[in-house]
C-alpha cells in the first residue's frame, strides 16, 4: 500500500504542477485507499475508532470534481459536483461467527455527489473540512454490508441493496502551503470516511450500511 501511495502522490504532484500555469482551478482529482470498519458512523467520528473489519476488506477509489461555487454566501465554503469509481476487494471464501461469506468477487461502485469544503486558513496554511452527500451504486452486494445485516446468532439477514445513500466526509491539508513549496499548493492529503447506508430504511428498507476509513491525495487544477 505504501509503495502505491508514493507512486500516486508523485503522479498527482506532476499533474498538478503541469496545470498550475494557467491559474484556473475549477477541477479536482482524488485517489484513495481504504479499509472496511465494523464500527458505525457515529463510533468512528465521535471516538476516532479506526479499527479494521474482521474480514479484512479494502477499497481503491478515484474521484473527479468540478467547482460549482467558490466562497458560498461569501463564506470560506467551496461547492463541488463530484463523481467517482471504486473497486472493492471482496473475500471469496470465508466463515466468521458461524456465517459463511463466499461466492463474492471484486465489486465496483459508481458515485455522484455534491461536496462542500470549509476552508480554514491560518499562518499561511490551509486545512479543509469536507462533507459530501449523494448516491452510490455497486454492481453486487458488498460483503461488509451483508456482514452488517446478518445476525450472528440467528443468521437472519436484514435487507441490503446495491443503490444506497452516500456520504463523503474528509479532513485534509494543503501540502504545498505546509512545506512552503509553491508548486505543490492545491495538492491535498488527508482522511476520508466512505459511508454507504439506507438512511434508516429510506433506501430499499435498508437500515445498515458500510464504512471505509481511507487515506487520499487530491489535487485542484
Image (tube, grey):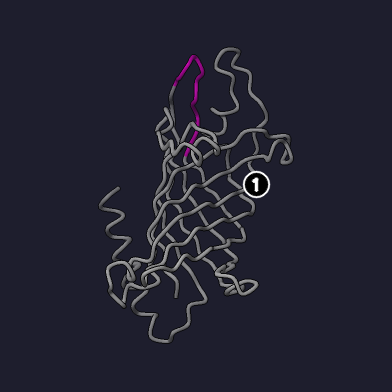
- Image coordinates of residue 23 in percent, x first then y, are 44, 84
For the point 45% across and 20% down, the residue is: 95
Q: For mark 1, does the 10 Å Cα neighbourhood hold few (<14), some (14 to 19), or many (20 or more) residues?
A: some
- Image coordinates of residue 160 in percent, x first then y, are 64, 33
Q: In which quarter of the image is residue 10?
A: bottom left
Q: Does the magenta stretch include residue 149?
A: no
Instruction: Judge whether 110 appears above or below 47 on screen.
Output: below
For the point 54% across and 27% down, the residue is: 147
What is the count of numbered marks?
A: 1
Q: Nearest the camera: 126 or 193?
A: 126
Q: In which quarter of the image is residue 134?
A: bottom right
- Image coordinates of residue 143 in percent, x first then y, are 52, 33
- Image coordinates of residue 122 in percent, x first then y, are 40, 68
Q: Give the range drawn in magenta.
A: 95-105
Q: Nearest the camera: 74 or 146?
A: 74
Task: Kindly identify which residue carries mark 1.
Answer: 165
- Location of the C terminus by quadrant is bottom left
Q: Is residue 103 magenta?
A: yes
Q: Nearest the camera: 183 or 9?
A: 183
Amino acid at each position: 500500500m505504501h509503495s502505491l501511495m508514493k507512486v500516486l502522490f508523485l503522479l498527482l504532484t506532476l499533474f498538478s504542477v503541469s496545470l498550475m500555469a494557467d491559474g484556473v482551478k475549477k477541477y479536482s482529482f482524488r485517489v484513495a485507499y481504504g479499509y472496511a470498519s465494523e464500527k458505525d458512523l457515529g463510533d468512528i467520528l465521535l471516538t476516532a475508532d479506526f479499527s479494521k473489519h474482521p474480514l479484512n476488506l479494502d477499497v481503491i477509489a478515484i474521484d473527479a470534481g468540478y467547482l460549482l461555487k467558490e466562497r458560498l454566501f461569501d463564506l470560506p465554503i467551496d461547492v463541488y459536483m463530484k463523481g467517482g469509481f471504486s473497486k472493492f476487494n471482496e473475500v471469496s471464501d470465508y466463515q466468521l461467527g458461524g456465517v459463511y461469506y463466499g461466492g463474492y468477487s471484486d465489486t465496483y461502485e459508481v458515485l455522484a455527489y455534491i461536496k462542500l469544503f470549509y476552508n480554514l486558513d491560518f499562518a499561511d496554511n490551509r486545512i479543509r473540512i469536507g462533507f459530501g452527500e449523494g448516491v452510490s451504486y455497486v454492481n453486487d452486494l458488498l460483503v461488509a454490508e451483508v456482514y452488517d445485516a446478518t445476525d450472528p446468532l440467528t443468521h437472519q439477514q436484514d435487507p441490503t441493496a446495491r443503490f444506497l445513500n452516500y456520504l463523503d466526509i474528509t479532513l485534509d491539508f494543503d501540502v504545498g502551503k505546509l512545506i512552503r513549496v509553491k508548486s505543490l499548493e492545491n495538492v491535498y492529503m488527508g482522511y476520508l470516511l466512505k459511508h454507504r447506508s439506507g438512511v434508516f430504511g429510506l433506501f430499499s428498507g435498508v437500515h445498515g450500511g458500510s464504512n471505509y476509513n481511507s487515506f487520499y491525495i487530491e489535487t485542484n487544477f
